[in-house]
Amino acid sequence: MFKRRIGPHPHEGDGNGSGAANSCPDIWELDSGDFAIIGTDQTAHLRPHLPSDAFLDPGEGIVVLPRQVLVKARESIPLE
């Protein structure tokens, strides 16, 4: 199911958004070609602030990924 990590390991180097051993924001490509995000669930906090044209369906949530994680993963994200 999990095909490959997108970007560096969460504990590799400094400033990857992982402050401790139990905080591991991460991006994974799945066998299906979709992506799985490991981050902080901020649904309850951010739902009331969604723009009027954004919606959460049942089963969906808002996951926050530290900026630095996505920036470091940029070169590993497939274009197609």
Image (spheres, grey):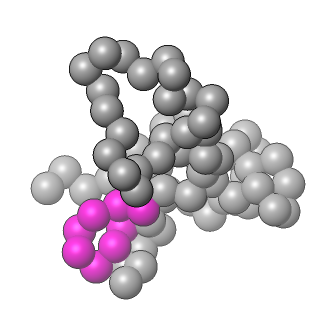
* Residue at 36% in and 16% down: 51
Of all residues, the one furthest to the right in this rendering is 20
* 53 vs 29, nearest the viewer: 53
Query: In the image, residue 65 lies at what x, y percent?
Result: 56, 42
- Residue at 37%, 84% in the rendered image: 1
Q: Position of residue 79 (x, y in %)?
A: 19, 51
Could you say which quadrant of the image residue 35 lies in?
bottom left
Q: In which image quadrant can residue 11 be found?
A: bottom right
Is residue 45 in view? yes
Q: Quadrant of the C terminus?
A: bottom left
Q: Would residue 75 be seen by someone viewing this image from the given angle?
A: no
**Which stretch is magenta?**
29-36
Q: Is residue 32 magenta?
A: yes
Look at the image and say whether residue 57 sits in the magenta stretch: no
As drawn, which residue projects farthest toward the left? 80
Q: For residue 46, what is the image quadrant? A: top right
Residue 67 placement, left or right of 34: right
Q: Is 16 on the left-hand or right-hand side of 33? A: right
- In this figure, what is the number of numbered marks? 0
Q: Is residue 30 above or below residue 63?
A: below
Q: Report x, y in % for residue 76.
A: 38, 55
Give the residue displayed 56% in from the left and 33% down from the top: 67
Compare residues 2 and 49 and report the one nearer the observer.
49
Q: Which residue, as the protein is rendered here, is positioned at the far front?
A: 58
- Compared with 11, 2 (above or below) is below
Query: Residue 63 placed where, x, y %?
Result: 53, 44
Q: Residue drawn 60% across and 36% down?
A: 44
